Image (cartoon, grey):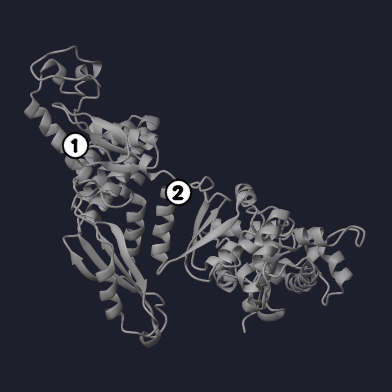
Amino acid sequence: MSRQNDTTPGQMALEDLGQPLAETSFVVLDIETTGGRAGTNGITEIAAVKVRGGEEIGMFSTLVNPDQPIPPLVTLLTGITDAMVVEAPRIDAVLPSLLEFLGDSVVVAHNAPFDIGHLRAECGRLDYTWPSPVVVDTLTLARKLVPRSEIPNHKLATLARFFGTDPQPTHRALADTRATVEVFHALLERIGAFGVDTLEELRGFGSAPTATQRRKRVLADDVPTAPGVYVFEDGQGKALYVGKSGNMRKRVRSYFTSAERRGRIREMLNLAERVTPIVCGTPLEAEVRELRLIAERDPSYNRRSRRPERASWIRFTSEPFPRLSIVRGLTGPGPHMGPFSSRSEAERALEALHHAFPLRQCTQRITPGRSSRSCVLAQLDRCGAPCEQRVSVEEYARHVDSAREAMTSRAGHVVTVLGDRIEVLAEQLRYEEAAAHRDRLAAFLRGATRAQRLSALASCPEIVAARPAEPDLPPETRRYEVCVVRHGRLAGTVTTPPGEDPWPHLRATVATAETVPEPDRPTPAPAAMPGEMECVLRWLERPDVTLVRVEGTWVSPVDAAQRYVDLTQLTDWHRGSSSAER
C-alpha cells in the first residue's frame, strides 16, 4: 500500500508535497579566490561534493590558475601560493567540467552569494550560460535554526565546532566543502522537527503556512493524481482561480505549504471553500481547458488570459475610403491583424502600416464626389487626400489591397520601407527616431505573424496528429497522445493505453470529436480563442509530432511576416533586407 493511501483526511502525503529531500541531489561547493570582489579577483580553488540521501556520490576538486598574483594576506589565510597554481588549469578550462558536475542538482554553500557571484561572473565573462540552479545558503539556514543563545556567531568554523564535524574548515576548498556537508546535514536534522521534508518546504522555510493554509489542506484530499485542470471556488460556486498540472493532487497540495508565498494566492485561499478537478486526457487538453475556463468564468485571482475577447486587433473599416482601425476583439468583416499584447503595441503596428502605405488617418466620413478640407498628412504626401478627390475610389482601393496583403501574406514592402528609413536615420545619427521605427516594425511583424499563423491553421477543416507520450520508452510499452484539430479548435484528444495499438483509439477519437462548423467569416481565429490556437500550434510544431491526416492546406505565405522577425535585431538594414530577399 502506498504512503498516500495511509494518510488520514487532512494529512499530506510526502510525495504530494513536492521533491522529497531524501531523493534530492545536492552539490555542496566552496571556492577560494585572490580577493573578495566577483569579476575582478580570480578564483584559485574550487571544490564540490555531490550528496543524496546523506551519502556522498561524487566529488570535484581542483586548483585554478587565477592569471594574477595571489596577495600575501590571502596566501597567509588559505596557504595557496603562486607556485601551487602556476601549473593549474585556468578557469575557462575548469568551468565546463564544473557545470557538467552541477547538472540539475541543488547547490549548497555557506554564504552562497559569494561563491555563486564569482561563478556567475566567470560564466558571463567567458560566455558560458549559468544554469541558475536552486541555491540553499547554509548561513541563512543556520541563522533561522541555531539561535545566538547557542553559538556566538554563524561562521562556518563556529558551526563546524558546534556540530562536531570532521573535517574542520581550513580555508581550503575541499576541507571547507566537506565541513559544509556535515553542517548542512545537521541543519536538515533540525529543520525536520518543523515538518520540513521536501525541497519546496526547505526553500520556503521561514515563511510558515498560515493558519488558513493549514486548516484548508483538506480541500485537496479528493483531487486525483492525474493531469488536468483544477478550479478553486468560493461558497457560492464562483471561480476564484483556475490552474493546470500534470499531477493535480501534487500541485493543489502545494498551495497549502510554506512554499506558497504569493500574497494574492494566500488571499484567495481565505475565500476558497472547495476545489473542483477536471481530469484531461492529455497535457494539451489541460492547457486548452485552462484557457477556456479562465475566459468563461473570469476568475478574479488569475492574472492572464482573463478577457481574451478584449484583445486589440487591426482591421479596415467598411466605407468607400476605408481606414485602419484598432478594435477590441474580432469584429466586423474582412481580415484582422493581431492579436496584440496591448493597445500601445497595436498603435505601433498601425504607425508602421501608415508609414508604408498612403492611407488616410482622419476619422471623418468621406463621400465620393464631395470634397472637404485636407489635413497636413496630405501636404506631406503621407495620404492620397481622398477628401479633396485627388484619388478615386478605385485608386485608393489599390492602396488598401496592398496594405491588406501586407497584413495577411506579404510583409516585404513594409520591411523594405521602414528598413530604409531606419538606415537613413541611423546614418544621420538620429538613433532615437530609428529605434522608434524599429519598434513599429517589430510590432507589425509580431501582429502579422500571429494573424498569419492563426489563419493558416483555421483554414484546415481537420488535422489529426499524434506523438509518443514517453519517447524514451520502447514501442511495446509506449503511450501516444492523439489530437484532433478542426478549424484551429481542439476538438478531441486522448492518451492511448501503454503498449496498445494506437490506431483504434485514434479512429475513435476522430469519430467522437467535437463538430466544428465551417466558419462564416475569414478571421484569423473564427472557431477558437487565439490563445488556444497558439497552444495547438506549439504542440503541432513539436519535432516528435506526426501528422496523421491534414484536410485542407496548412501552409504559410512565402513572404510571411515570420520570415522577417529576426531583422528587427539587425543594425545593417540593407544587408538584412538583401539576405531576406535571397
Horizontally, residue 286 falls left or right of residue 164, namely left
Kindly state the secondary structure of the residue where label 1 is placed.
helix
Q: Which residue is drawn at 28% across and 74% down?
A: 508
Residue 283 percent coordinates (x, y) = 42, 66
Type of amino acid under label 2: Arg
Disc number placed over residue 102 in the picture, else none: none
Nearer the observer, 9 or 503: 9
Horizontally, residue 96 falls left or right of residue 486, namely right
Residue 30 percent coordinates (x, y) = 71, 67
Looking at the picture, does residue 72 appear above or below residue 530?
below
Looking at the picture, does residue 109 appear above or below residue 385?
below
Q: Which residue is drawn at 66% across and 67% down?
A: 199
The residue carrying pointer 2 sits among few (fewer than 14), some (14 to 19) or many (20 or more) residues within 10 Å by Cα, namely some
Horizontally, residue 5 falls left or right of residue 335, namely right
In primary-sequence order, the first of circles 1 and 2 is 2
Q: Distance of mark 1 from mark 2, alpha carbons?
A: 37 Å
Q: Mark 1 points at which residue?
A: 403
Disc number placed over residue 297 in the picture, else none: 2
Kindly state the secondary structure of the residue where label 2 is placed.
helix
